[in-house]
Every structure is written in C-alpha cells, then in structure tokens.
Amino acid sequence: MSSPGPTATVVPKTDGTGMRGAGPDGEHRSRAATVVRVRVDGMTSPRPAGPADSSPNRFAARAVDLGAVKEAADARDRAKEEAVSGAPVALAAPVTAESFEQDLVVRSTQVPVIVQLGSSRAPGSDEMSQAFASSALEQTEPASWVFRYVDVDTVPEIAQAFGVQSVPTVLALAAGRPLTSFEGVQPPEQTDRFISAVLQATAGKLPGLPSTGEPAGDEESPADPRFTEAAEALDREDYVGAVALYDAVIDDVGAPAEDVSEAKAARATAVLLGRSADGSADDIDRMLLEGRRREAFDVLIDRMRTSAGDEKDAARTRLLGLFSLYDPADPEVIDARTRMASALF
C-alpha cells in the first residue's frame, strides 16, 4: 500500500558502543542499554537484528524464528489454560511491555492479531487506530481477529523489537509470527481491505478465540513431537534432517492446519540455513534469512523487468523456487506472483 501522509520515524540509539541487539557472546543487551525516540522528520534508521527469546525481540528483523518451536507449543498451552478459565477476550486493546506475550504471541495462536504501532504525534495515526478498533468491535461472535495498539512513545522497546522504521506501521501476526505489514496512514476503506486479505490468508489455519465459560482448550491436541525433533536437528546443524521432519508434518493429512502452517514457515528457513552452511547461499538467500523477503522478491522482479532471454528466465525460475518455500496463501507471495506476471510482458 502507498503512504499518502507524513510518518514519524523510530530512531534507535546505541549504548555508546555502536552496537544494538545481540553481542558476540549471543547474549542480548538489556533494555536500559537502548533508547528509542520518535521523530516526525522523514529520517529512517537501519532495521535492528535480534536473537530469538520470549521477549518482543523474538520478532526482530521479521525473520522466521526457528528457536521458537518450543515456545510456540508453550504459547498454545497458555492459550489452552486461558480457554479453560473462560475469560473474555478484548477485541481492541493497548499493548504494554508486560502484556506483549499474552496480547500478541499467545493471542495470535488463536486468531490473527492486527497491531498498529503509532504515536499521537504522527498525523493521522490516532484516526487510523480508531478505525481499526471500530472494525474490531463491530464483529459479531465468534470474532475472527483482534486489534492491538502499541504507543511507541510509551513502549518504544516494542517498536524497536519489531524493527519499525516509521510510524504508524501496521502488522498482521498469525501463529506467533509477522504475516504482512504496511507503513503510513491509510483511509478506512483500505484498512478494511487489509483486514479482509489477512482473514483470507489465515482462513481455517487458526483455532479461533475460546468461547467464554467453555473449556475449549481441553479438546486441543498435544504439541507435535516432530517440532521438537526438528529443533534438535537444527541445533546439530542437521538441516536435511530438519527439513525431512517438517515435510512429515506438512504431508500428514491428520496434522492440524496450524501445525502445517508453522512447519512450512520453519521449513523455509531450514532450507535457507542449509544453503548458507554448504556455501551455496547467494545474496537473495541472505536477504530471506534476514527477514527481508519482500526485498528479495523485488530484486528478482526488477531483474525480470530489465532483462531478456536467459537472464530473464533465470530470474523467473528463481522466483518460482522461492514461492515454493512459502504458503501460497501468504499475502506477500500473492502480491509478488501478481507483480511477476506483469513483469513477464
């Protein structure tokens, strides 16, 4: 989507060492070591990379989090416990650092979560968040999605964790991971289209919100042990073995749709890690590993537009190979396929 209005920029500041995120020993710097400030001046900053953990930093760089396989199972267990309690779920609510995991990670294992990271200092941000909130609250039961708002002036660490470069930014989360996003203010008709696209992409893949007072979680299946085995294979750098285990989940006709979706996402990164390990990874693979999927698609589509003959065919073949790594219903994949088709002629 285009961004018709001005945006505010999230500018990470370092702790004086010039570094952000994980250090050489793999340990993440404390929140106190990083300050995030918001300016409405059009400047941008590099997207920070961060390791996988149970904090908001698990989403840094928007890459698939292989280390979160066990955490995803734990999140499903917490969602199960919540279902037993029968507590009602707010359809629109603000997010704090303390509620991050429950409001975004756990909730997105049940239904898509649309998150706006905004600031009252960014023109149009408040109006767009009100439009999203109204759409969420107008749903009839059972609700199919929820809206969450992050005030970057109050909880800047969440904005940094998501790698947000400007506000407002809107992300859709499903199964604990970012699905798609856009930057800038959009009118209500465009936000409604965004919601519809997210719901279409996730249809039948998430269990839904628990019914109030009903122990729906008692009927949930235990976590598939193949995910744990795949995580152990990745720890051993046995990428072929991990891919085989994810394939087993994907090909299992009895596997829950949520597990199949999770396996497809994890398989894609396992394949890319395997290429990196054997030295066959190229710049496109590295972009994907860093979570820069749209950028990787854009590079190949631009190459198709500006080339001919064998070079154009090679770019097309590479794109099709990338598409096969991801869910065909993913909005970014659908968009890239459409743009690839126009680049063919």
Image (cartoon, grey):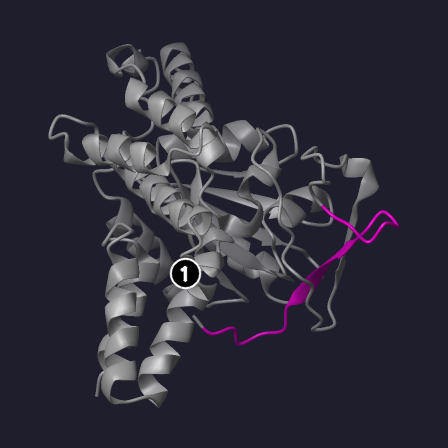
Quarter occupied by residue 22: top right
Near-viewer residue (227 or 85): 227
Up/down of 278 relative to 334, above or below: above
Above or below, 223 relative to 27: above
Quarter where residue 306 is shown: bottom left
**Residue 19 placement (x, y as % from top left):** 77, 50
Locate the N terminus by quadrant.
Answer: bottom left
Q: Alpha-carbon neighbours of circle 1 within 10 Å: few (<14), some, or many (≥20)?
A: some
Foreground of the two, 198 or 320: 320
Mark 1: amino acid:
Thr
The residue wearing badge 1 is 191
Question: Extreme right residue here?
Answer: 16
Asked whether residue 214 is in view, the answer is no
* The C terminus lies in quadrant: bottom left
- Horizontal side of 9 relative to 307 (left or right) equals right
* 323 left or right, relative to 27: left
The residue range painted magenta reads 2-20
Pinpoint residue 68: horizontal percent, then vertical percent: 47, 30
Q: Residue at x 56, y 38 (%)?
A: 58
- The stretch drawn in magenta includes residue 165: no
